Amino acid sequence: MADFKIAPSILSADFARLGEEVDNVIKSGADIVHFDVMDNHYVPNLTIGPLVCDALRKHGVTAEIDVHLMVKPVDRIIPDFAEAGASYITFHPEGSEHIDRTLQMIRELGCKSGLVFNPATPLDCLKYVMDKVDMILLMSVNPGFGGQSFIPATLDKLREARKLIDDSGYDIRLEIDGGVKVDNIREIAEAGADTFVAGSAIFGAVGENDANDYDTVVGAMRAELAKA
Ligand code: DX5
Ligand code: ZN
């Protein structure tokens, strides 16, 4: 079975209790903290920056932090995230004038690098930088907000990206972001994804007594992935 990883997007967490939220979701069996950075310019929303990443590290979070930069231009802020303890730093090709250079900078700063493709952005530029990416992230919604529906055409794009990775022979993770739920995660895994971002599906899960129920939803996702 593939090495599947679940990456809860803290965009849907309770920001007033962020450290505790991250602790709870990692305790429930999630693997990676997905950290959505929005600048109210590249995307029409504004979220969190390096100070919050640093605060999570100081709080004691040791899980990998996967920083998804929805920011333009992107280069200026990258060293700050490396300093703040990011594990992965991914960006959209539209956010950089020099994609190859930005990828190199991320690795030189000691982080894993990645490119993110919007639903209608072709994978073309990947061909020239396969040796410089540790992660390919396909957006299955248009970036900017949690809680949107999975765009089905992304399944074919996942198969295309999976083939590129397998043919390249490089060790590259294939991450999917947007509208991932218990009832579609298996199909998404079968199309080639190995890393699954889920925001509203995880942080919106409420169990008995209206308490958050991350164990149940993360467990249900793992059970679906075990069938893929
Ligand atoms: C959207 C973000 C996502 C978002 C996913 O721009 O990149 O990470 O939080 O949220 P859900 O899982 O609710 O679609
Ligand atoms: Zn994201």
Image (spheres, helix red, strand yellow):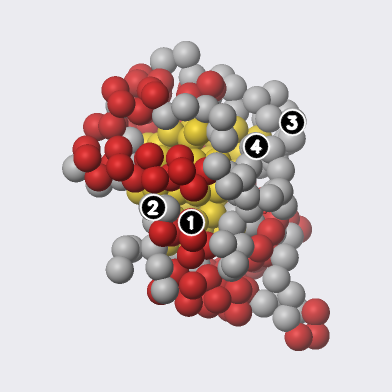
* SS label for mark 4: loop
Q: Nearer the viewer, residue 84 or 9?
A: 9
Which numbered mark, 2 or 4, is in the foreground of this view?
A: 2
Amino acid type for the residue under numbered disc 2:
Gly
CA gap, disc 3 and disc 2:
30 Å
Earlier in the chain: of badge 2 and badge 4, it is: 4
Residue 69 occupies which quadrant of the picture?
Answer: top right
Residue assigned mark 3: 44
CA gap, disc 1 and disc 4:
17 Å
CA gap, disc 1 and disc 3:
27 Å
Residue 76, disc: none
Earlier in the chain: of badge 4 and badge 3, it is: 3
Residue assigned mark 4: 142
* SS label for mark 2: loop
Mark 2 crowdedness (10 Å alpha carbons): few <14, some 14-19, many ≥20: many
Residue assigned mark 1: 188
Residue 192, disc: 2
Name the spot of residue 36 as percent of width and height, x first.
60, 44
Does the beta carbon of the residue at mark 4 sit less than 8 Å from ligand 1?
yes
Q: Nearer the viewer, residue 175 or 10?
A: 175
| Left-right relation of 220 to 111 | right
Amino acid type for the residue under numbered disc 1:
Ile
Q: Can you say which quadrant of the picture contains the N terminus?
A: bottom left
Q: Is residue 128 visible?
A: yes
The answer to whether residue 70 is above or below residue 196 is above
Name the spot of residue 141 as percent of width and height, x first.
63, 42
